[in-house]
Image (cartoon, helix red, strand yellow):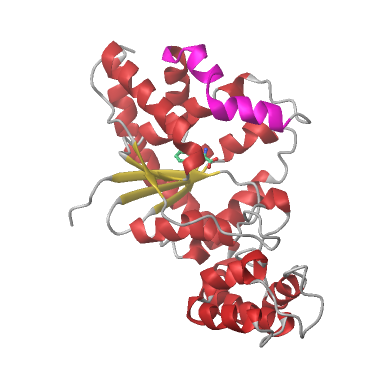
């Protein structure tokens, strides 16, 4: 069967994934599995760039991330799932590309400057962190991937990868395609407090969230602060519960809008209806999770098999790269 191209994408194993990660990235990856040849890497070396001080949890996080991916519906029969550090070719290509990447390109990268400012409590003034985009370029190029599903925040890194490609192809010989970003179409998911759902805001519902915990979290959400009593009319526009209804309960959204404004529905009921929807939405994800979670060895085996296949593809590229560079 003809494929549209080759995809690489990755995530840093920094903890359990939430519904924002699912809607914003994973659900799109699941859709791409049949149309593209897909390589999905759990990029543990990237996790070291900011987390080099706490490495004990990385191994466990990799396995948890694999289970989150599988529970989202990534299918190891139809895509490759592997751990970046199992495919040493990423490191070799990173080293070679680092030789031709001007420091100025890395220092002016907006994500670099932002992170340095934001993560001021961590010392990330390291060689490895500066080179984050070079490692990311290596992840993509080692498979000659032409398509990279990512969020908007990653666009500067993709641009840098293309600049590195142009420089390599010019200096040696045309070897790499210029990888293009494929923006994932989903809107930003509001979290429990109405801000963007994000681990750092502590406002998430995990993909693995148990039904009781989902219900508890939804019940604790703040609604329209002006609506003090059940008989007061509410304003859905300022309500985080309503923002989530719009995404997970589209059929009932219009009715809830009307009922809220005329105090026809109370916040307790409105939250219960949202929680029911979320629990229902997560059910098939949990179903798959249960199967993998009880068999950690199978998950490790699958990662090893994925890495073996990824290595084969990477080895082909690396032979070409070494040759192009005259090594
Ligand atoms: N930088 C990406 C992120 O933080 C993760 C990543 C690493 C990646 N290597 C990649 C994404 C290669 C796409 C392609 O989300």
Q: Residue 77: tell me if it is visible.
A: no
Residue displayed at 39% across by 39% down: 311
Quadrant where the N terminus is found in the figure: bottom left
Residue 303, given in percent of the width and then of the height, sits at 49, 52
Q: Residue furthest left?
A: 2
Query: Compared to 300, does 253 lie above or below?
Result: below
Residue 310, given in percent of the width and then of the height, sits at 38, 43
Q: Residue furthest bottom?
A: 264
Specify start and end residues of the magenta stretch as a single range. 100-119
Query: Compared to 308, does 65 lie above or below?
Result: below
Residue displayed at 30% across by 25% down: 319
Residue displayed at 34% across by 57% down: 33
Q: Residue 220: tell me if it is visible.
A: yes
Query: Compared to 98, does 290 lie above or below?
Result: below
Q: Nearer the viewer, residue 280 or 271?
A: 271
Q: Nearer the viewer, residue 182 or 249?
A: 249
Where is residue 74, by image quadrant? bottom left
Residue 262, given in percent of the width and then of the height, sits at 65, 84
Query: Compared to 45, does 286 lie above or below?
Result: below
On the picture, is 181 further left or further right than 303? left
Where is residue 228, by image quadrant? bottom right
Q: Nearer the viewer, residue 77 or 122?
A: 122
Residue displayed at 62% across by 38% down: 47
On the picture, is 183 further left or further right than 103? left
On the picture, is 316 further left or further right than 104? left
């Amino acid at each position: 069967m003809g494929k549209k191209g080759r995809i690489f994408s990755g995530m840093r194993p920094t903890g359990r994934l939430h519904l924002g990660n699912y809607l914003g990235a994973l659900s799109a990856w699941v859709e791409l599995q049949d149309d593209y040849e897909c390589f999905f890497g759990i990029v543990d070396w990237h996790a070291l760039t900011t987390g080099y001080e706490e490495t004990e949890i990385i191994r466990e996080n990799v396995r948890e991330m694999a289970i989150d991916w599988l529970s989202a519906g990534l299918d190891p029969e139809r895509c490759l799932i592997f751990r970046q550090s199992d495919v040493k070719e990423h490191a070799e290509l990173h080293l070679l590309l680092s030789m031709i990447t001007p420091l100025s390109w890395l220092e002016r990268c907006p994500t670099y400057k932002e992170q340095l400012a934001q993560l001021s409590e961590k010392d990330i003034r390291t060689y490895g962190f500066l080179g984050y985009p070079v490692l990311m370029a290596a992840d993509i190029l080692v498979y000659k991937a032409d398509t990279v599903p990512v969020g908007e925040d990653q666009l500067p890194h993709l641009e840098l990868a293309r600049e590195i490609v142009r420089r390599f192809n010019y200096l040696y010989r045309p070897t790499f395609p210029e990888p293009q970003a494929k923006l994932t179409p989903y809107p930003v998911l509001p979290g429990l407090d109405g801000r963007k759902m994000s681990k750092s805001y502590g406002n998430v519902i995990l993909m693995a969230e148990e039904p009781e915990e989902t219900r508890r979290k939804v019940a604790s959400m703040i609604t329209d602060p002006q609506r003090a009593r059940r008989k007061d009319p509410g304003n859905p526009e300022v309500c985080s519960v309503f923002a989530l209804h719009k995404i997970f309960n589209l059929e009932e959204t219009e009715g809830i809008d009307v009922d809220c404004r005329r105090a026809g529905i109370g916040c307790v009921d409105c939250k219960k209806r949202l929680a029911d929807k979320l629990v229902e939405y997560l059910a098939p994800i949990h179903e798959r999770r249960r199967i993998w979670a009880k068999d950690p060895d199978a998950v490790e085996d699958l990662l090893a098999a994925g890495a073996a296949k990824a290595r084969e593809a990477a080895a082909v590229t690396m032979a070409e790269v070494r040759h192009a560079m005259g090594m």
